[in-house]
Image: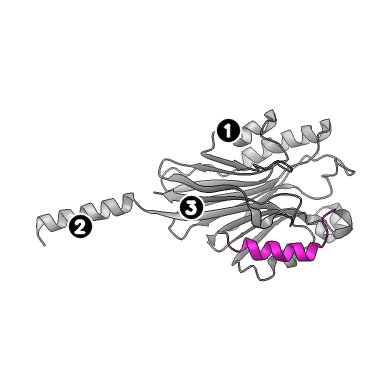
Amino acid sequence: MTLLRSLLILMFLLVSAASAGERISVLTLNVAGLPDFLTSQANPEVRSFHIAQRARKWDVVAYQEDFYYSKWLDYLDGFDTTVRGTKWHKWAYVWTWLKKSGLTIKTNWSTQEPVFLAFEKCYGYRNHGSDCWVPKGVLCMRMLTPGGVVVDFCNTHMDAGNKEGSQEARRHQIGEYLKFLPPPELDIPWVRIEAGDFNLRNHQPDIRPLLDGKDVVVGNTTGGNDVDYITVLTNNLIEVVVLEYGTVPMFEGLSDHSGIGLILDLEY
């Protein structure tokens, strides 16, 4: 092989490596999965079935409030991996589904063992301050995209309500959440994607630690329950190009929250 040919092959390999990339899609949705008599969302089995059918079009899916109708969400959705965050506690002796955090992650990518943190603080058992019945927290799982990018994916649901007790509990949860997040990898193409129901709106000061410094922030752009987000953080070895983002019409009417979607090109 001539020196010129060797140089051309080397240049081709370098250009190919520099232009490598792939497209990924992420969905987050609070599915309003409380038992029928505890929620205003009617026909939970039918809703869950239609959510599952639509969700299988996405690469990675994060659910919140996946409590009582999990088998319908799992039915025929086609995902190889489904993980849920659970922690046994006293109320689970009364009703076993109360051990669920409501956090679910689904994907067909290669995965490692998930890790789940149940928040230490919560507020209340009644009305808009009723977050202590289940172990809300954060569920994280490391994944590998088909192109070989390491993705640390985290799903969370924080306390609701505007009472002082709810706000204090949520601030404590934010501190726990930030400490629990996987740290960046420095020597491999790496992305951390965080999704979930933060129960905070974009104008509220408490949300800043969750959004500031991220490469991409996507939320509900249509009003209503505008507390759901997807954020993306990368290291210096990868770039993201946002192709589509925002609320996903195919999930409207299937929950009291909108589905939030994000489609990215990863370049590395």
- For disc 3, the marked residue is 150
In the rendered structure, which amino acid carries the disc numbered 3? Val
Q: Position of residue 110 (x, y in %)?
A: 52, 62
Work out which residue is located at the far left of the displayed protein and give it: 2
- For disc 1, the marked residue is 212
How crowded pointer 3 is (Cα within 10 Å; few <14, some 14-19, many 20+) is rated as some
Tell me, yes or no, whether the two marked residues, 3 and 1, touch with CB atoms within 8 Å.
no
How crowded pointer 2 is (Cα within 10 Å; few <14, some 14-19, many 20+) is rated as few
Q: Earlier in the sequence, mark 2 or mark 1?
A: 2
Circle number at residue 111: none
Label 3 or label 1, whichever lies nearer to me, is 1
Say which quarter of the image contains residue 6.
bottom left
Look at 10% across and 55% down and name the residue there.
3
Look at 60% across and 36% down and name the residue there.
211
- For disc 2, the marked residue is 9
In the image, taking residue 146 as reference, residue 30 lies left or right, namely: right
In the rendered structure, which amino acid carries the disc numbered 2? Ile
Q: Position of residue 71 (x, y in %)?
A: 74, 67
Considering depth in this image, is 168 or 180 the residue closer to the camera? 168
Residue 87 visible? The answer is: no
Tell me, yes or no, whether the two marked residues, 2 and 1, touch with CB atoms within 8 Å.
no
Q: Position of residue 36 (x, y in %)?
A: 86, 59
Q: Gap between marks 3 and 2, in whole Å?
A: 28 Å
